[in-house]
Image (cartoon, rainbow, N blue to C red):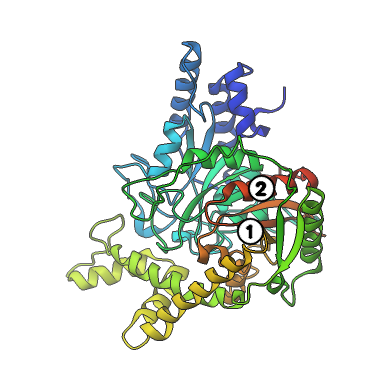
Amino acid sequence: MTNITDLGIKQIRDGVREGSFSAREVAEAHIEKVAAAKSLNAFLIETPDHALAAADAADKAKATGEELAPLAGVPIGMKDLFCTEGVEARAASAILDGFTPTYESTVSGKLFAAGAGMLGKLNMDQFAMGSSNETSAFGNVVSPWRRNDGGNTDMSPGGSSGGSSAAVAARLCPGATGTDTGGSIRQPAAFTGISGIKPTYGRCSRWGIIAFASSLDQAGSMARDVTDCAIMLEAMAGFDPKDSTSLDAPVPNWEGGLNADLKGKRVGIPKEYRIDGTPAEINALWDQGAEWLKDAGAEIVEVSLPHTKYALPAYYIIAPAEASSNLARYDGVRYGHRELPDGAGLQDMYAETREAGFGAEVKRRIMIGTYVLSAGFYDAYYTQAQKVRQLIANDFERAWSECDVLLTPTAPSAAFGLGEKSDDPIAMYLNDVFAVPASMAGLPAMSVPGGLDGQGLPLGLQIVGRELDEQGVLNAGLAIEQRAGFTARPEQWW
């Protein structure tokens, strides 16, 4: 029999239902893989008891003839940004060290109610701020991929959901939760050769997700193919009265609606995404992706998104501004870590706690955000950025009169080595240049693997769709997946 840990979500779900193997066998195999992969540093906390309890519940339900829940028997990884009852949630930050929620985030609660077990909490960039997984207080996540140059450079798994992407790519779990503020699901998915979808803003409740930038944050699913992403996202999504930004809209049967026949569909190629300096391999894959979609029956049209060039600067005003407000709550009084030197007063405790608890990138973004929100600068920066954001959304609205989905590269490069860009934050921020516009407009978008670059590293293609048209995004992603035939996987060295 195929190694259980090579199976995806659908294969595990169906195998448990058909009795091909037990849910406990699945959980034990993955627990063993997680325990043997410490060198990837993908998991911050391992929760084998949780995974086994969910597996035993699935096996018991099957033995007694009960109808199995949609994810019964499927163990997953949970990004550390999700609050999980009784299990530490630290957002990979020292300032939340020791914080154990007494409640369950809506998304994790939905997944557990659907029968999923949790293998553990996944490492990430601290408070989701980063594109390489080098800002975690608990060490870098190492991608399971390596260049084909014979070296052993540790590669970035992307960020911020790098623990999730590395764990899925390394077969430690068949699927994982991610969050996407400006590309944090799509870019790591592209870096590690897996699929990841960010749904429409509001599709998944943000209640119980540790906030970075509230008007942008959105949970999504990461797995090894489009079908698994659809299955997992369906279990995560839905209206939540506890989240004022939650969309009161029905959740479609995305798995049942999957169809790679794109006859009658138009795919837009935004001409502004042709950026000088983009590697030829990225542009070649983009062109190949358009050919694949054409082969699936779609018509390819060129569209214009004229305000795209302002998306990244506007994002790096809005997101830090909201982060500086959200992170003000971490002061040593209510959560996790506290620094209280002898004789210190209240203000001293705030300052010492924040100095010790926040990492350098988090402090940088808090400072940027505090500056742009300060008296005399608010209108010049924050208000102006919000106006730009509306112009970007208007661009997309106009584009939908000409096409049904957009096709772009996911990232301007393949994965880079850990440390290779850490001294240049601007270069790091540019990694999200293709992903940020869809986040600014709150649109669904996903990355699917399309091929390898000359160094043997995965490259991703991004599909962006209309608001609430996750089905259109998934279908276009499936069409690419079927034609790309991406079966490459990292050789096990860990």
In the image, which is nearer the foreground, mark 2 or mark 1? 2
x and y, in percent, of residue 337 in the image: 31, 57
- Residue 170 in which image quadrant: top right
Residue at the location (35% across, 41% down)?
104
Whether residue 347 is situated above or below residue 20 in the rendered picture: below
Do the residues bearing badges 2 and 1 touch, measured as CB atoms within 8 Å?
A: no
Residue 361 left/right relative to 21: left
Crowding at label 1, few (<14), some or many (≥20) Cα neighbours within 10 Å?
many
> 258 and 342: which one is in front?
258
- Residue 362 in which image quadrant: bottom left
Whether residue 27 is situated above or below residue 420 in the rendered picture: above
Res 335 visible: yes
> 261 and 371: which one is in front?
261
x and y, in percent, of residue 32 in the image: 58, 32
Q: Among all residues in the image, which is located at the extreme top?
A: 64
Q: Among all residues in the image, which is located at the extreme bottom?
A: 376
x and y, in percent, of residue 334 in the image: 24, 57
Residue at the location (41% across, 86% down)?
380
Residue type pointed to by label 2 = Ile
Residue type pointed to by label 1 = Ser
> 232 and 262: which one is in front?
262
Q: Which residue is mark 1?
A: 156
x and y, in percent, of residue 259 in the image: 69, 40
Mark earlier in primary sequence (2, 1): 1
* Dot 1: element: loop
Residue 38 left/right relative to 416: left
Crowding at label 2, few (<14), some or many (≥20) Cα neighbours within 10 Å?
many
The quadrant of the picture occupied by the N terminus is top right
Residue at the location (57% across, 54% down)?
162
| Distance from the alpha carbon under mark 2 to that under mark 1 | 14 Å
- Residue 194: image tag: 2
* Dot 2: element: loop
